[in-house]
C-alpha cells in the first residue's frame, strides 16, 4: 500500500495527534533504546515529532496539515507515509481517517511502548533487537531496564492498611453529604475519558502467514490434542513461524516435543525449540528485520510514471518482495527452502535492499538458466554491498558495467550465438533464446569482436520476454492490493 501514498495522503490533508493514555518521560527511554534500533532514526523522529504536538498533560493536539510536519522533519510525504506505516506495524501508532466535503482528516493516535518486561517477553521484538544490537549491546540494554528487587527473605512488610489509618465518620454536620444528586454528577460526560496510563500493545502478525489447515491435516489427536492449541498457542505459532520461516510440517514436529503430561503446550520450550531449529538450519545465526519491498525513500518511480520499458521494469522490481518475485517467476509455486535461504542470507548478511536483491535474482536467474547458484549470487551481492548499491537503477547500471566480470564468476556457462546486431543472445537448455537487458548493443558488439566464439556472454531479454515478466509482476501486485483493501 505504501507505493500508493499519493492516493492515500497529500500535503493538504489535515491531521490531529492524539495519545492513547498519558505518555511519560520513561516512555522516551523505551522508545530510544528499544524501538529506535528496529525503526531507524526516521521512524523514531516521526513518533517524537508527533508527540511534541501534544500539549503537556493533554491527550489531544491541534489540527493542522501535513505541510507542517514535512517542514519540521525536512522529509517528503512519501518518506513520512512509509515511516507512519512502520510505526503502525510495530504497534506504536493507530491511524483513523474520515472524508467530508472532499477534505480528509486523519487522527494519529500514539500508542505507549511496551513495558520492559513485556518487550523482553515478546519473541519477535527481542530476536530482532538482538540481531540489530549484537550480544554485548543487547545485554547492556537489557540490564539498563532492570534493577535489584527487594530481598523479601530479609525484610518484612509493615505497611498499614487504609482501615488502620482512617475511620468512616457519620455526622449530621458534615459539609458534603453523599446524596443522590452528587452521585449523579460523578460519571464523565459522553465522549470524554479519564487521563490515564495505558499499556502498550504487541505487534500483530496476520493469521494468513501460517497454513493451519496443513498443520492440522497430519495432527494426531493422540500426540497433540487439538484442545491443546489454544488461542494463545496459535498466536505463538503464528509469530514463531513468521520470525523463523517455519513451515507447518516442521512446526508440527516441533510441537510434539513441547507437550507436557497435562497435554498443555509449554510456550517457553516452543520458543527455544523454534530458535534451535532455525540455528540448526541457518548455521547458528538469528533472523533479522528487513522491509518486504524497496523502502519508499529509495524508490525512483513511486510518484511518477515510467516512460520506457526499462523504467517500467524498475518500477515493478521496486514494488515486489524477493520472495514474491521468485514465486511469480516459478509460475506461482513456492520457492524452495534452499532458494529462500540464499535470499535471506543476502539480505541479512550483505544488507542489500529488497529492490536490489530483486535485480540480483533477475540477473542471476537469466544468466544461469533459471537456477540460483549460491556461490555466484554471494559474489555479486558482496560486490554490490561494497559499492553501497541502494536503488534498483544503480543495481541495473552496475550489472551492465560489470557483466563481463560477473560472467567470469559464473559456475555455469550457457552456450551463446550472435544475434546479428541488436545485442547478443543466450540459448537456454530448453532452446529458448533471450537477450540480456544488462548489456548494451555497443558493449556486446565490441566483446563479440574481442572474444569471438566465447560462450560466457549474458544476453539481454527480448522485448516480449520483458513484457511477459512485467505483466506477471503487475498481476501479482494487483492481487496483493486487493488483499490489502
Image: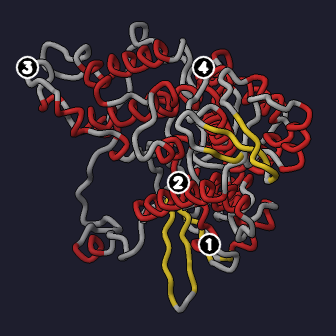
Name the residue that disc number 2 marks: 88
Name the residue that disc number 4 marks: 143
Q: Nearer the viewer, mark 2 or mark 3?
A: 3
- Quarter of the image that includes the C terminus: bottom left
Name the residue that disc number 3 marks: 222
As drawn, the label of residue 9 is: 1
- Quarter of the image that includes the N terminus: bottom right
Mark 4 and mark 1 lie on one chain; the one further toward the N terminus is: 1
* Up-down relation of residue 478 to residue 212 (above or below): below
**Which residue is at a point 11% across and 23% down the rendered structure image?**
220
Mark 3 and mark 4 lie on one chain; the one further toward the N terminus is: 4
Q: Nearer the viewer, residue 322 or 11?
A: 322
Q: Secondary structure at mark 1?
A: loop
Mark 2 and mark 3 lie on one chain; the one further toward the N terminus is: 2
Q: Secondary structure at mark 2?
A: helix
**Distance from the alpha carbon under mark 4 to that under mark 1:** 41 Å
**Which residue is at a point 25% across and 16% down the rendered structure image?**
258
Residue 180, image x, y percentages = 22, 74
**Distance from the alpha carbon under mark 2 to that under mark 3:** 41 Å
The count of marks equals: 4
**Distance from the alpha carbon under mark 1 to that under mark 2:** 15 Å
Query: Could you tell me if residue 28 is visible in this image?
Result: no
Amino acid at each position: 500500500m505504501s507505493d500508493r501514498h499519493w492516493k492515500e495522503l497529500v500535503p493538504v490533508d489535515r491531521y490531529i495527534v492524539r495519545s492513547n493514555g498519558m505518555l511519560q518521560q520513561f516512555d522516551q527511554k523505551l522508545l530510544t533504546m528499544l524501538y529506535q534500533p528496529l525503526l531507524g532514526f526516521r521512524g523514531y523522529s516521526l513518533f517524537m515529532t508527533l508527540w511534541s504536538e501534544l500539549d503537556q498533560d493533554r491527550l489531544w493536539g491541534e489540527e493542522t496539515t501535513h505541510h507542517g510536519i514535512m517542514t519540521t522533519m525536512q522529509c517528503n510525504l512519501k518518506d513520512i507515509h512509509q515511516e507512519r506505516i512502520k510505526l503502525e506495524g510495530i504497534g506504536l501508532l493507530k491511524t483513523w481517517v474520515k472524508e467530508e466535503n472532499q477534505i480528509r482528516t486523519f487522527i494519529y493516535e500514539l500508542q505507549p511502548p511496551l513495558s520492559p518486561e513485556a518487550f523482553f517477553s515478546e519473541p519477535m521484538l527481542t530476536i530482532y533487537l538482538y540481531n540489530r544490537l549484537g550480544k554485548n549491546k543487547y545485554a547492556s540494554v537489557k540490564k539498563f531496564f532492570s534493577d535489584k528487587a527487594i530481598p523479601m527473605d530479609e525484610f518484612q512488610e509493615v505497611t498499614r492498611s487504609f482501615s488502620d489509618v482512617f475511620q468512616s465518620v457519620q455526622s449530621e454536620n458534615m459539609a458534603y453529604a453523599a446524596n443522590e444528586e452528587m452521585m449523579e454528577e460523578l460519571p464523565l460526560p459522553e465522549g470524554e475519558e479519564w487521563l490515564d496510563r495505558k499499556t502498550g500493545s504487541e505487534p500483530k502478525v496476520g493469521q494468513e502467514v501460517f497454513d493451519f489447515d496443513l498443520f492440522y491435516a497430519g495432527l494426531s489427536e493422540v500426540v497433540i490434542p487439538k484442545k491443546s492449541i489454544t488461542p494463545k498457542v496459535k498466536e505463538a505459532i503464528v509469530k514463531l513461524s513468521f520470525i523463523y520461516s517455519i513451515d507447518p510440517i516442521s512446526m508440527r514436529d516441533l510441537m510434539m516435543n513441547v507437550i507436557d503430561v497435562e497435554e498443555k503446550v509449554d510456550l517457553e520450550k516452543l520458543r527455544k525449540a523454534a530458535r534451535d531449529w532455525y540455528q540448526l538450519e541457518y548455521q547458528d545465526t538469528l533472523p533479522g528485520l528487513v522491509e518486504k519491498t524497496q523502502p519508499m525513500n529509495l524508490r525512483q518511480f513511486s510518484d511518477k510514471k515510467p516512460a520506457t520499458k526499462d523504467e517500467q521494469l524498475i518500477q515493478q522490481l521496486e514494488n515486489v518482495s524477493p520472495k514474491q518475485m521468485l514465486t511469480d517467476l516459478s509460475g506461482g509455486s513456492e520457492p524452495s527452502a534452499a532458494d529462500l535461504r540464499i535470499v535471506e542470507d543476502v539480505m541479512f548478511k550483505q544488507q542489500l535492499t529488497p529492490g536490489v536483491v530483486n535485480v540480483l535474482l533477475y540477473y542471476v536467474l537469466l544468466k544461469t538458466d533459471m537456477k540460483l547458484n549460491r556461490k555466484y549470487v554471494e559474489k555479486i551481492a558482496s560486490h554490490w554491498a561494497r559499492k553501497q548499491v541502494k536503488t534498483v537503477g544503480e543495481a541495473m547500471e552496475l550489472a551492465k558495467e560489470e557483466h563481463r566480470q560477473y560472467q567470469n564468476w559464473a559456475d555455469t556457462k550457457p552456450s551463446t550465438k550472435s544475434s546479428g546486431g541488436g545485442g547478443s543472445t543466450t540459448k537456454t537448455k530448453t532452446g529458448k533464446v533471450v537477450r540480456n537487458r544488462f548489456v548494451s548493443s555497443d558493449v556486446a558488439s565490441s566483446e563479440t569482436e574481442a572474444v569471438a566464439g566465447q560462450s560466457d556472454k549474458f544476453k539481454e531479454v527480448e522485448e516480449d520476454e520483458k513484457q511477459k515478466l512485467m505483466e506477471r509482476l503487475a498481476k501479482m501486485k494487483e492481487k496483493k492490493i486487493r488483499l490489502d483493501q
